[in-house]
């Protein structure tokens, strides 16, 4: 289990590599590379983003959920 505020983004029917690239690129542009302000964990059903700052988690969730 990772520490931080978790935001889960499920893989949806019709999701494409392009849509996931957009999500990940946006996160990197806004928060920097994983490890400083956030980390990630991926499974076959979803991708979890763990944020150190609650404001970052809220901003990400509002944009991508």
Image (cartoon, rainbow, N blue to C red):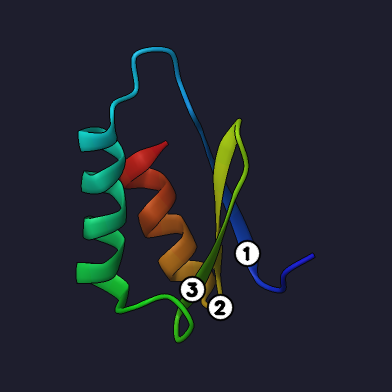
Q: Dot 3 corresponds to which residue?
A: 38
> Can you tell which of label 3 and label 2 is closer to the viewer?
3
Q: CA distance from mark 3 to mark 2?
A: 6 Å
Q: Is residue 30 above or below residue 42?
A: below
Q: Is residue 27 above or below residue 53?
A: above
Q: Secondary structure at mark 1?
A: strand
Q: CA distance from mark 2 to mark 1?
A: 6 Å
Q: Report crowding for label 3: few under 14, some 14 to 19, many 20 or more residues within 10 A (C-alpha).
A: many
Is 14 on the left or on the right of 48, as rendered?
Answer: left
Image mark for residue 52: 2
| Count of residue discs | 3
Image point (60%, 34%), residue name:
44
Q: Report crowding for label 2: few under 14, some 14 to 19, many 20 or more residues within 10 A (C-alpha).
A: some
Image mark for residue 5: 1
Q: Quadrant of residue 25?
A: bottom left
Tag 3 and tag 2, C-beta contact below 8 Å: yes
Image point (43%, 13%), residue name:
13
The quadrant the C terminus occupies is top left
Tag 2 and tag 1, C-beta contact below 8 Å: yes
In front of the other: 8 or 33? 33
Is 16 on the left or on the right of 46, as rendered?
Answer: left
Residue 26 is situated, as x and y percent measured from the top left of the image, at 22, 57
Residue 22 is situated, as x and y percent measured from the top left of the image, at 21, 46
Q: CA distance from mark 3 to mark 1?
A: 9 Å
Q: Secondary structure at mark 3?
A: strand
Residue 38 is situated, as x and y percent measured from the top left of the image, at 48, 73
In front of the other: 37 or 35? 35
The disc, 3 or 1, on the residue closer to the chain's N-terminal end is 1
In front of the other: 50 or 58? 50
């Amino acid at each position: 289990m990772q520490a931080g505020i978790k935001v889960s983004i499920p893989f949806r029917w019709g999701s494409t590599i392009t849509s996931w690239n957009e999500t990940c690129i946006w996160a990197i542009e806004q928060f920097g590379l994983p490890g400083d302000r956030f980390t990630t964990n991926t499974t076959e059903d979803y991708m979890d983003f763990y944020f150190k700052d609650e404001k970052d988690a809220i901003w990400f969730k509002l944009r991508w959920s």
